[in-house]
Amino acid sequence: MNSTLGMVILGFLARAPLTGYEITRTVTGALRFFWHASHSQVYPELARLEAAGLVQVEHIAQQGKPDQKRYTPTRAGLDALAAWLVGPLEPAKRRSEIAVRAYCSAYALPQAAADMFAAQARQHAERVAQFEAYRAHLEDLPDNPLADVGSIEFADYAVVMRGLALEQAQAQWSGWMAERLRAAAAPR
């Protein structure tokens, strides 16, 4: 059984050979809203993938430093990735701190709770703007690579559209909570 992190890493490597550092940078870059992994998780997973024959390593000599390791998926790794991509999804984890705060909001001062939810709405609105900017960038690419659902650009676009929808919903809901709580805090 391959780990989800292993499959995420294989997905990155299918796009381009990468070092462990580059993989970690990718996780903290474009995918940071959907996936997180630290150096301490990435490197042991790369070792497991290598031991399982799913990646191969190229050692690149460096002056005055240890060799750099650049990873690429093997045919078996690409086959495992392809099987994982269309396999059943694990049930989504349903933990949400903001939902618990809403559930318990009757025990908070309405104005203080409204301020917290308004801050959440602003944070989500900022992320909406980030996703919209990236969406516009992808939509402006020459030769319309988004028309090809098999392209990396379309895959990026699909993730951006999901993130945009989720952030818009979170911004709208958090704003709604703030409005309701402000109304409850208003003098009558």
Image (cartoon, rainbow, N blue to C red):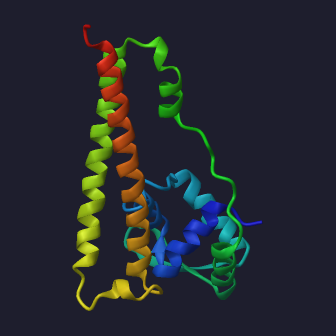
Q: In this view, does 100 lie to the left or right of 127?
A: right
In which quadrant of the rendered image does the N terminus lie? Answer: bottom right
Q: How many labels does the image show?
A: 0
Camera sees residue 66: yes
Q: Which residue is drawn at 62% across and 68% down?
A: 7
Q: Who is closer to the viewer here, 1 or 85?
A: 85
Q: Which residue is drawn at 63% across and 46% down?
A: 93
- Is 92 rendered above or below residue 3? above
Q: Is residue 163 left or right of residue 36?
A: left
Q: In this view, does 102 lie to the left or right of 132?
A: right
Residue 145 pos. (x, y %): 34, 87
**Residue most extreme to the right:** 1
Residue 71 pos. (x, y %): 54, 76
Q: Residue at x 59, y 39 (%)?
A: 95
- Is 89 rendered above or below residue 15? above
Q: In this view, does 147 lie to the left or right of 90?
A: left
Quadrant of residue 153 in the image? Answer: bottom left
Residue 129 pos. (x, y %): 24, 54
**Residue most extreme to the top:** 188
Q: Who is closer to the viewer here, 116 or 24?
A: 116
Camera sees residue 70: no
Residue 188 pos. (x, y %): 26, 7
- Is 82 rendered above or below residue 168? below
Q: Who is closer to the viewer here, 36 or 22?
A: 36
**Residue most extreme to the front:** 188
